[in-house]
Image: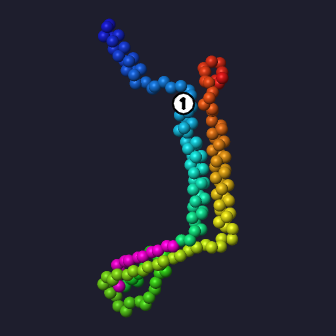
Amino acid sequence: MKCFIACICFLFSLIFSYSQPSSTLVKLIEQSNKNYAANKATAFRTLAAQSQTNVIKNQFKPQLQAAYQINYATYNNITGMVFPSFVTPISGPPAMANSYNGVFGSAAALIAKWDVVTFGYEKSLLQQANTQINAAKAKEQLRKSMLPKQKNNYSYSGKMFN
């Protein structure tokens, strides 16, 4: 009998020692507000809208792009362009005879781009981005205003909030 009581006491001590820590309702609400995915999503939408303005501003600055390609191919192949993204592809006369000897080919390019006159396109994009920033901030403020306030006194008597 003493062994049975000792086993029951030991089991209860294990159950209570490994149970969840008690937390108040205020702590649980604070934790849910902090970790709620929709709150994080609205904050990230605001951040994305703000970074969009930086992208638009940098898009219309002068750009200088450089490319250099080198390849090794057979003489039958057009020796030169592997990736014709920056370099205009070349064409030349066909080879007189098939030759499988390897040859090096190369190409270089330097492209300068600057949209001096955009006819108001850049300004309209910036206005649209600013509107998106304001809308994202408003949604974030609305979501924050809908959350329960932390200053409320919570009790378990007849009413939920005092």
Residue 29 lies left or right of residue 87; in this view the side is right
Q: Label 1 sits on what residue type?
A: Leu
Q: Nearer the viewer, residue 149 or 2?
A: 149
Residue 140 lies left or right of residue 21; in this view the side is right
Asked whether residue 115 is in view, the answer is yes
Q: What quarter of the picture does the N terminus occupy? A: top left
Tell me where residue 160 appears, x and y as whole percent.
64, 23
Q: Which residue is painted at 44% across and 79% down in the image? A: 108
- Figure colour scheme: rainbow
Magenta stretch contains residue 89: no
Relative height, residue 4 to residue 80 (above, below): above
User: What secondary structure is the stretch in magenta mostly built from?
Assistant: strand
For disc 1, the marked residue is 28
* Numbered range of the magenta stretch: 64-75
Kindly give the residue lying farthest to the bottom in the view shown.
Answer: 96
- Give the image quarter of residue 132: bottom right
Tell me where residue 27 appears, x and y as whole percent.
54, 29
Q: Which residue is painted at 31% across and 82% down in the image? A: 102
Relative height, residue 59 to residue 77 (above, below): above
Tell me where residue 21 appears, x and y as whole percent.
46, 25
Tell me where residue 138 appears, x and y as whole percent.
67, 46
Q: Nearer the viewer, residue 119 or 32?
A: 119
Relative height, residue 20 to residue 142 (above, below): above
Residue 147 lies left or right of residue 88; in this view the side is right
Query: What secondary structure is found at the residue carrying circle 1?
Result: helix
- Give the image quarter of residue 74: bottom left
At label 1, counting other C-alpha atoms closer than 10 Å, the crowd grade (few under 14, some 14-19, many 20 or more) is few
